[in-house]
Amino acid sequence: MALNLNKKKTIVSKINQISNSALSAVIANSQGISANQINQLRKLGRKLGVKMSVVRNTLLSLAVKNTTFECLKKIIKGSTFIAYSTNHPGSGARLFKKFEKKNKQFKITGGVFEGKLLSNLEINQLADMPTYEEAIAKLLLILKISAAGKLIYTLSAIKRKKETS
């Protein structure tokens, strides 16, 4: 389907607005993935605050110009599917990583965080980064374990003292 100039301008403007407010971006090659699978992925993404688009490479290059995602221009090729994380920097990478495990044709080709192009290892680290709620839960668990450890230590010290007296 051919796009006229006004539609192209609208797409570029929309992607540029998202680029200016997003925390991170991940791109993937979605060739060979059905529209139904893409729609399921988008549905999951909306719940996590991830905005996704299949965009022509030239339009994406124009849209990311003068943003922190401008370095994506170097790696844009093929069928580009982009996910912008707006709530948590790792949510788009996490979503794409899970989808890539289930669909061998889907390949993550790059990512950007804080204006830096990420390697595959860094994309995996970004995906594994805990959300705020997960980090708080881990902290509470550690505090609970350490408090229980102190209690056990105190009780054993009392027991030893009673045994010696």
Image (cartoon, helix red, strand yellow):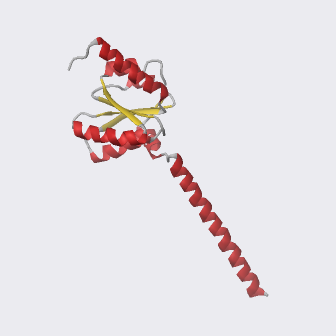
Residue nearest the observer in this picture, 61 or 12 = 12
Up-down relation of residue 85 to residue 77 (above or below): below
Up-down relation of residue 45 to residue 61 (above or below): below
Which residue appears farthest toward the top when viewing the image?
A: 5
Q: Is residue 150 left or right of residue 8?
A: right
Circle count: 0
Residue drawn 54% across and 55% down? 137
Quadrant assignment for the N terminus? top left
Up-down relation of residue 138 to residue 148 (above or below): above
Residue nearest the observer in this picture, 116 or 64 = 64
Picture coordinates of residue 114, whole percent (x, y): 51, 31
Asked whether residue 41 appears in the rendered view, the answer is yes
Picture coordinates of residue 106, whole percent (x, y): 28, 39
- Name which quarter of the figure residue 9 lies in: top left
Q: Is residue 105 left or right of residue 65?
A: left
Residue drawn 35% across and 43% down? 44
- Name which quarter of the figure residue 160 lies in: bottom right
Picture coordinates of residue 89, whole percent (x, y): 48, 38
Q: Is residue 103 left or right of residue 90?
A: left
- Name which quarter of the figure residue 164 lies in: bottom right
Picture coordinates of residue 111, whole percent (x, y): 42, 33
Which residue appears farthest toward the right when viewing the image?
A: 165
Quadrant assignment for the C terminus? bottom right
Asked whether residue 33 appears in the rendered view, the answer is no
